[in-house]
Amino acid sequence: MRFESARDTIKSFDYLLFAAVASLVAIGIIFIHSASAWRGEWGEMAPFYDYAPRQFQWALIAVGFFFAILVPRYSRFRTFAFGFYVVMLAVLFSTLFIGTGPARAPVKRWLEISIAGHHLFDFQPSQLMEVAVVVAIAKYLMFKRNIRLRHVLVVLMMAGVPMLIILRQPDLGTALLFVPLPFVMLYAAGAPARYVAGFVGLAAAAVPVFWAVVMKPYQKARFLAWLHPYEFETTSGWQYIHSRIAVGSGGLFGMGLGRGTQNSLKYLSEKRTDFIFAVICEEWGFVGALIVIILYLLIFLCGLGIAARTRDPFGRLLAVGVVSLLATQTFINMGMNVGIMPITGLTLPFISYGGSSLVASFIAVGIMMNVAVHPVVTLARDGY
């Protein structure tokens, strides 16, 4: 039985999806090296430190989580879906009291993991919270044949509570990922379009309140700098201006690896995380950027293909939710790099430096791949 199960897993394994993910990780390591090696951070005289080896180590750990996720049949995830959600919500809430952030910044996004007084790494709970929300909503909606208003409200609450906590950290970029997610999963579950459209309209109407009450002064400054960058040239508009210069100066084939002026002369800040796509555009040009975009499109199309093939409502919602998360994050990050969206401080999946993000992204893709390698046919209590 074990041999047959392994054979079926190998047969159903989506090699195109995994190859696209692995290619993005490899590109990420290359450009993390280009953005960090032989130079310090922007505006500082820092010693040599190359973050690429650390990212490679995190990649190995992330791949281990990916294949571990493939072992159990994904239907077993339903058993602890709500428990996982509650635990991650509690861990996320704890960051407001014991969380850490960059020096001299009122940010509490990470938890320090230490053993016997030795600091091992920093963990960002919001990354795994995204996965927990997808699994919990998928379980809640899987057998809902006639989705009522109360069901929509429950789903919005499941996504809204962690979103509010993340906004308090504050982390506007990650919080934005929870905005389209419940609507996409509700639509995939068969919710009436009037419910989805109505709440989207309410969300749009609440934007002025969000601006006045929720957004921090520096977040408002970033939005204004997006509209009028040269009025904030030396402050909030700096990143926006120089990321666009980097993107535009790459031309067709780029300046060459490590030869980008915005990168090497340290005009780009956060270049190994938030603005690594601008570095790719500058040093690999339009062709390199197009390759990256095609790889992301392959991942999204593979995920939607998995959702279309599965006959199990839980698996279908899992795949749709993962695609929604990754596509939203990719669009926001690329958008702020090329200047069509305000800067929100969101990383690029699989490419930007960061262990928590990389592990969480691999777990999400592992869940989606599990739906493909362990097909389940569910005869629901209610039709799907």
Image (cartoon, rainbow, N blue to C red):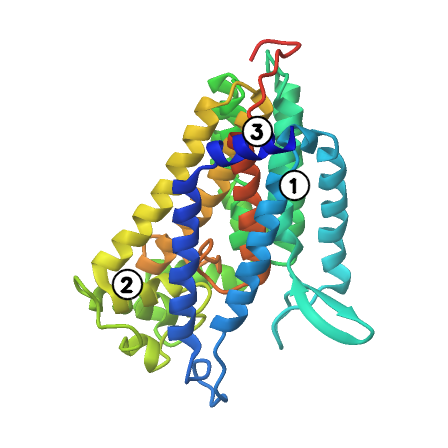
User: Whole-Å distance between the Cαs marked 1 and 3?
Assistant: 20 Å
Label 3 SS:
loop
Q: Is residue 307 above or below residue 204?
A: above
Query: Viewer-nearest of labels 1 and 3?
Result: 3
Measured in 3D between alpha carbons, the distance from the residue under mark 1 to the one under mark 2, in whole angstroms, is 33 Å
The answer to whether residue 235 is above or below residue 220 is: below
Horizontal and vertical percent for residue 237?
37, 68
Question: Measuring 63% from the left and 12% from the top, which residue is drawn there?
Answer: 380
Q: Amino acid at mark 3?
A: His
The residue pinned by badge 1 equals 132
Residue 144 appears left or right of 221: right
The image shows residue 163, relative to residue 46, as above or below, that is above
At x 27%, y 78%, the residue is 261
Which residue is disc 2 drawn over? 281
Examine the image and state in which quarter residue 71 appears: top right
Residue type, numbered disc 2: Cys
Of the numbered discs 1 and 2, the one sitting upstream in the chain is 1
* Residue under pointer 3: 374
Q: Closer to the N terminus: mark 3 or mark 2? A: 2
Q: Nearer the viewer, residue 207 or 157?
A: 157
Q: Is residue 68 left or right of residue 293?
A: right
- Crowding near pointer 2: few (<14 within 10 Å), some, many (20+)? many
**In the figure, is residue 269 to the left or right of 134?**
left
Residue drawn at the location 38% of the way across and 61% of the way down: 27
Horizontal side, residue 281 vs residue 132: left or right: left
Tell me how far mark 3 sits from mark 2, CA to CA: 38 Å
